[in-house]
């Protein structure tokens, strides 16, 4: 479930300038990105984001 939340959030961030800027301000801090996502209603762990990044490079 959290991987689906992650992918949904990433799609949302791509189409929303405000969210994209929040994510960009996190830099490489995946904990920060997960917190931004949670504020926007999406729950996933920083570890899930790290795994997703490895799989999609």
Image (spheres, grey):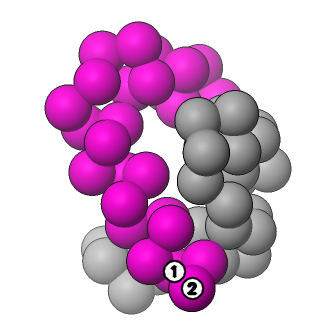
Residue matched to label 2: 1
Location of residue 20 with respect to 56 vertically, above or below: above
Mark 1 to mark 2 CA distance (whole Å)? 5 Å
Q: Which mark is residue 3?
A: 1
Magenta highlight: main SS? helix
- For the residues bearing labels 1 and 2, Cβ distance under 8 angstroms: yes
User: What segment is highlighted magenta in the picture?
Assistant: 1-28
Taking the view exactly as shown, the residue that stands out farthest to the front is 41
Which of the pair 49/11 is nearer the observer?
Answer: 11
Q: Secondary structure at mark 2?
A: loop
Residue at the image point whose x is 61% and y is 45% from the top: 41
Residue at the image point whose x is 53% and y is 31% from the top: 23
Does residue 13 appear left or right of residue 53 in this picture? left
Q: Position of residue 50 (x, y in %)?
A: 61, 72
Mark 1 neighbour class, 10 Å CA radius: few under 14, some 14 to 19, many 20 or more: some
Residue at the image point whose x is 45% and y is 24% from the top: 19
Q: Secondary structure at mark 1?
A: helix
Please tell me whether residue 27 belongs to the stretch shown in magenta.
yes
């Amino acid at each position: 479930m959290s991987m689906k939340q992650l992918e949904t959030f990433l799609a949302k961030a791509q189409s929303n300038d405000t969210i994209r800027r929040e994510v960009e301000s996190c830099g490489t801090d995946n904990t920060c990105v997960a917190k931004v996502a949670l504020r926007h209603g999406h729950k996933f762990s920083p570890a899930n984001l790290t795994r997703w990044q490895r799989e999609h490079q």
